[in-house]
Amino acid sequence: MLEVREVSKRFGSTQALAPLSLRFQRGGTTALLGPSGCGKSTLLRIIVGLLSTDTGAVWFDETPVTPANLLAVRRRMGYVIQDGGLFPHMTIFDNITLMARNLKWDRQRIDTKLAELMAITHLPAESLNRFPTQVSGGQRQRVSLMRALFLEPDVLLLDEPMGALDPLIRNDLQRDLREIFSRLQRTVVIVTHDIGEAGFLADEIVVLKQGRIAQQGSLADLVNRPEDEFVTRFINAQRSPLESLGGAS
């Protein structure tokens, strides 16, 4: 479904992505993991077409993505960013249904899809007539997810969607996301810097270091069979303070 082939990107003197190739499992969830500045968000923006490549290409459904087919490909992708990207002057209903209304869906079709997504994201019906500033951060992210899923995309791309949420809300949303990924069987790519989140949500984890792939595999592979000293340091740096206290006792 989705592949990048020898893709690279430079911003001035900074090499954000060295030439890298990566295939994403059809129907699976892949986490792009790494510290700030490692290139994970750049790669996601290249996949969705917000950035052009310096070299290489993105392939979608066995076809290279070009300016001629980019719009059609984008309509088969859902994209969620960290702060949700909701329009503050529009109601929750209008934000969620924006593209469907733009594509002239009839109201019955919109209402049917809306009810389906509200059920799986647990968004309360009373929030539909509110504005983004009138609902919680967790609800805003659920709204962003519903908007991304509304056109039934083949691929769902999430760029640190829970990075700004407090731990309790984040935990609840992680559990809901895993259930949604399992239920919908879409190809999902999620960017995160949290190894626990990556291990909880993803079938496969790709660790990036300075624009290159340091290691690719399961969480067990990264923990028990690290291929790069950087991977070990990155994992150890995220050890829970409670885990450290337990070890000390």
Image (cartoon, rainbow, N blue to C red):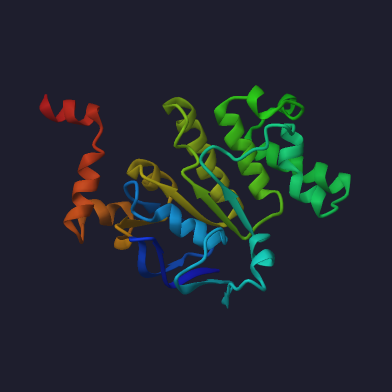
Task: Locate residue 154, reporting x and y percent.
Answer: 62, 60
Q: Nearer the viewer, residue 176 or 155?
A: 155
In the rendered view, would you say 22 is above or below 113? below
Rendering quarter of residue 1: bottom right
Q: Is residue 154 above or below residue 100?
A: below
Residue at the far left: name it: 248
Residue at image point 66% right, 42% down: 146
Picture residue at 32% right of the left edge, 57% below the top: 208
Q: Is residue 24 left or right of residue 220?
A: right
> Residue visible at 64% across and 33% down?
122
Assign the C terminus to one quadrant of the image: top left
User: At which x and y percent is residue 186?
Assistant: 58, 57
Figure check: 188 above or below 2 = above
x and y, in percent, of residue 199 in the image: 37, 47
Q: Is residue 231 left or right of residue 171?
A: left
State the image coordinates of residue 21 (x, y, percent, origin top left): 40, 71
Q: How many marks?
A: 0
Give whichever of 68, 98 is nearer the camera: 68
Q: Residue at x 64, y 25 (%)?
A: 133
Left or right of 233 in this view: 121? right
